[in-house]
Amino acid sequence: MKLINLVGTRPQFIKAAALSRQLKLNSSIQEIIVHTGQHFDKNMSAVFFDDMMIPKPKYNLQVNSLSHGAMTGRMIEKIEEVLQKENPDFILVYGDTNSTLAGALAAKKLHVKVAHVEAGLRSFDMQMPEETNRILTDRISDILFCPTDTAIKNLEIEGYNNFNCKIVKNGDVMMDVALFYAKISAQKSNIIEQLNLKDFVLATIHRQENTDNLDYLKNIISAFNTIAEKINLVLPLHPRTRAIIEKNNIKTSFKIINPVGYFEILELLKNCKLVITDSGGLQKEAFYFHKHCITVRKQTEWVELVNGGFSCLANSNLESIILAYEKMENKKSDFNVDYFGKGNASEIVVQTLLSY
Ligand code: UD1
Ligand code: UDP
């Protein structure tokens, strides 16, 4: 079997690393990694390939920094060329980015089977580019790998049992690699000593709905400034957010660092007191490392974390984030709950592909 493992963004490198490790164990599958180029800075891309020993992409399509339509369109064209050349049996796409949709669409039109990892998730907010990407990708996928029971239920409600596709609950592929690399991250990274961190909050902000609304971004930064009066706050800063903060001269009084590699983020997660984020991946990783999380979004696809009291939603305003911080700062919870599978999500994907 010939399979294209399609990646483009930071979380996709992490998810593809989980799959790539499993695929290596099966000599009957030929894996070809295709990088759309959506993320391209060294510490947004190459660092993950190095840290997680992901095979070098055979193709890098170098499509990035464009509007949604231009980016998705150019990716479709270039992925189509690769598909015509390689003629694979499957394309594996992850999550909800423009790279995901471009890969699924290019493949479907050429009758290449599409397997979607992280299928069935919904925020029910059609303003989010990710919601459009995930709904359209799900609809044209042949195999939908769902991380949670909620994802399966979402698909049932949308009538997917009447469609010609296979739905599998496999769990979260990010959990597979988080648990694996957490065992070695302390030897690989000394970021905690380097930054001299003791009690600290780990924060990330990059989602378009927060960064493209200047009032929201100012409110969030203002909340971080307030929290940083009480406790250290570290923000590895996504280039999208950095550009807007710099352009608008927004004052920050906490520790800003460049985006970090996978070993560094694992060490930050293991050692922090609390996570504040709008990231999809980080919400789950906080849970894996038994940290409470404030999710700076109107809603989340990972509803189980909110319902279980592990995460708390906060609107993008000062009061809402501070209230959430006060609620979560000293909270105690039993994190031994199985929402996202058993850490064998990528193995289930490979076994399903082999028996399809
Ligand atoms: C994308 C995904 C988002 C995901 C995020 C993961 C879409 C619609 N959005 O958002 O769902 O959560 O990736 O991080 O696909 N940039 C750099 N260097 C880089 C990467 C990006 O400078 O290595 C700049 C780009 O030039 C662009 C901006 O950051 O101006 C945004 O990048 P883009 O890939 O469009 O979207 P993300 O915000 O990264
Ligand atoms: N991450 C990282 N370095 C950073 C910030 C994030 O390695 O400086 C990792 C982290 O493990 C997270 C993943 O990148 O789960 C996802 O990235 P991001 O938050 O950009 O995307 P999302 O999950 O929201 O799509």
Image: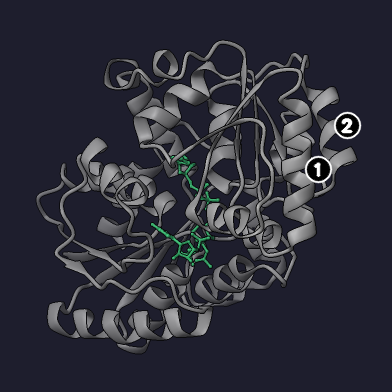
Which quadrant holds the C terminus?
bottom left
**How many C-alpha atoms fall within 10 Å of the one at disc 1: few (<14), some, or many (≥20)?**
many
Q: Secondary structure at mark 1?
A: loop
Does mark 2's beta carbon lie closer than 8 Å to ligand 2? no
**Residue 229, percent from left and from top:** 75, 22
Q: Does the residue at mark 2 contact the one at mark 1 (Cβ under 8 Å)? A: yes
Q: Is residue 299 visible to the viewer in this orientation of the structure?
A: no
**Residue 142, percent from left and from top:** 42, 72
Q: According to the image, label 1 marks what residue?
A: 314
**How many C-alpha atoms fall within 10 Å of the one at disc 2: few (<14), some, or many (≥20)?**
few
Identify the amino acid type marked 1: Ala
**Residue 297, percent from left and from top:** 74, 50
Q: Residue furthest front?
A: 249
On the image, which quarter does residue 116 sit in? bottom left
Q: Nearer the viewer, residue 246 or 272?
A: 246
Identify the amino acid type marked 2: Leu
Q: Residue at x 69, y 61 (%)?
A: 209
Q: Residue at x 36, y 84 (%)?
A: 74
Q: Residue at x 77, y 55 (%)?
A: 216
| Residue 226 horizontal side relative to residue 267, left or right | right
Q: Residue at x 50, y 19 (%)?
A: 270
Q: Give the colour scheme of this rendering.
A: one colour
Q: Is residue 308 above or below residue 22?
A: above
Q: Is residue 347 visible to the viewer in this orientation of the structure?
A: yes
Q: Nearer the viewer, residue 103 or 10?
A: 10
Q: Nearer the viewer, residue 13 or 175?
A: 13
In three-dimensional space, the C-alpha distance between marks 2 and 1, rounded to whole angstroms, equals: 8 Å
Number of the label disc, if any, that sits on residue 253: none
Q: According to the image, label 2 marks what residue?
A: 323
Which quadrant holds the N terminus?
bottom left
Q: Residue furthest left?
A: 27
**Residue 299, percent from left and from top:** 76, 52
